[in-house]
Amino acid sequence: MNLSTAACLLALATGASAFAPQPSSSRTAATTANMAASTAEDTETKSSSKGATKDPLLIRAARGEKTERTPVWMMRQAGRHMQCYRDLCKEHKTFRERSEIPEVAVEVSLQPWRAYSTDGCILFSDILTPLPGMGVEFDIDEKVGPVVEPMRTWDDVKKMHLIDPSTAAPFTGEALRTLRKELPDETALLGFVGCPYTLATYLVEGKTSKEYLEIKKMAFTEPDLLHAILKNLAESITEYALFQIEAGAQLIQIFDSWAGHLSARDYDTFAAPYQKMILDKIKEKHPEIPTVVYIKHSGALIERMAGTGADVVSLDWTVDMAEGRERIAAGRAKAGLKGPGGVQGNLDPGLLFGSQETIKERAEEILKKAGPTGHVMNLGHGIEAATSEENANFFIQTVRNFRHEGQE
């Protein structure tokens, strides 16, 4: 691996951070304790099942099974908030380089797991990664974000084609296979994809947007054109999700981040049907694989999200956890789905800039409201780049140390 691995590991051990520096001995002790606790838990889990290895804690929780504690990971846990990642960026300067060179993507994916002992390790990648395999080129400007040649005509749509993930994104498969070998049995390997509507916002707008006026204009003046784009995306994203599962992903999270800008009626028309296409095919091919759906600012859409058939609805921080659980159950019941469904989230990422006393209080409040089953603890959105590693670690350890009544 062409990486400054020793420097990375040293940075993880010392927890160097521009925002909350610690003495190296303190951070080293914390990291060592985290890894020791994780190893002990792995050993206990394996031995308790009389030689048979259990599925990872996070996977069991996502299925609604009774668990010994609530699992925890963080969206965007691999990345800019870690000094080790920032050091790595000096050698591998572009996001696509970091996410499309398998050994680099593996290293970045493992960094937060090593530092914090998260219960899930998510592949370091991007929702736009499969686009070139569909005939849509893109770039990621380090300051502007994703940049795509706008797609606004039928001629543009005709250039799209079904992805072959094994040739379009072999690096994704290689990274997942390597991660599966590197991780212990008790840590879940997480894959993810972007949903058609959110991907279409980039295709139609050409870049990140605040108002999404171009795609809404298309939705209301040329809906057939937008549906053609969405259908093409859904078919390829389904193939890409299945490819990740076959390469070792044990859970798939689907991100429809910008669907929160839609009205309920337009969500039902332009987002939910295409989410369901992906989810239904995953369940058809791999019924054992849990699925999670996340939308930012989704408070008005929770019942609809639950009705898509995702096993877990990931709530953003604007929703009360107890109310969210009730609404998820109601949405599933209305759709004729069995069981109350699972929930993920939903600590406000901004709270990680607060005191550790506040982090603990708020995290435990969410844990208590969510209850002992069917909950994967997470943030309500991705971790902010300026977050200190000390507080990120404190959040993870707070959750790992929490027990509901009856849990060991």
Image (cartoon, helix red, strand yellow):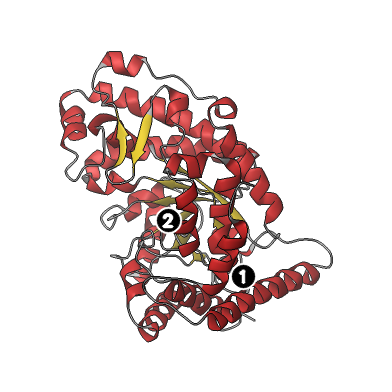
108 relative to 234, above or below: below
Q: Using the rendered image of the protein, determine whether residue 261 is visible from the camera's viewpoint.
A: yes
Q: Can you tell which mark lies on residue 366?
A: none
**Kind of residue at disc 1:** Thr
Dot 2 alpha-carbon crowd within 10 angstroms: few under 14, some 14 to 19, many 20 or more = many
**Kind of residue at disc 2:** Val
Residue 56's image quarter? bottom right
Q: Using the rendered image of the protein, determine whether residue 284 is visible from the camera's viewpoint.
A: no
Which residue occupies 42% across, 50% down?
293
First along the sequence among labels 2 and 1: 1
- Does dot 2 land on a helix, a strand or a loop? strand
In the foreground, 325 or 115: 115
- Residue farthest toward the right in the current orientation of the protein: 51
- Does dot 1 land on a helix, a strand or a loop? loop
Which residue carries the number 1 mark?
A: 67
97 relative to 360, above or below: above
In the foreground, 86 or 336: 86
377 relative to 258, above or below: below
Q: CA distance from mark 2 to mark 1?
A: 18 Å
Which residue occupies 83% across, 68% down?
50
Q: x and y percent of residue 31 in the render?
A: 59, 75
Which residue occupies 53% across, 67% down?
11
Relative to 311, 321 lies left or right = left
In the foreground, 208 or 371: 208
Q: x and y percent of residue 177 in the render?
A: 66, 44
356 relative to 42, above or below: below
Which residue carries the number 2 mark?
A: 313
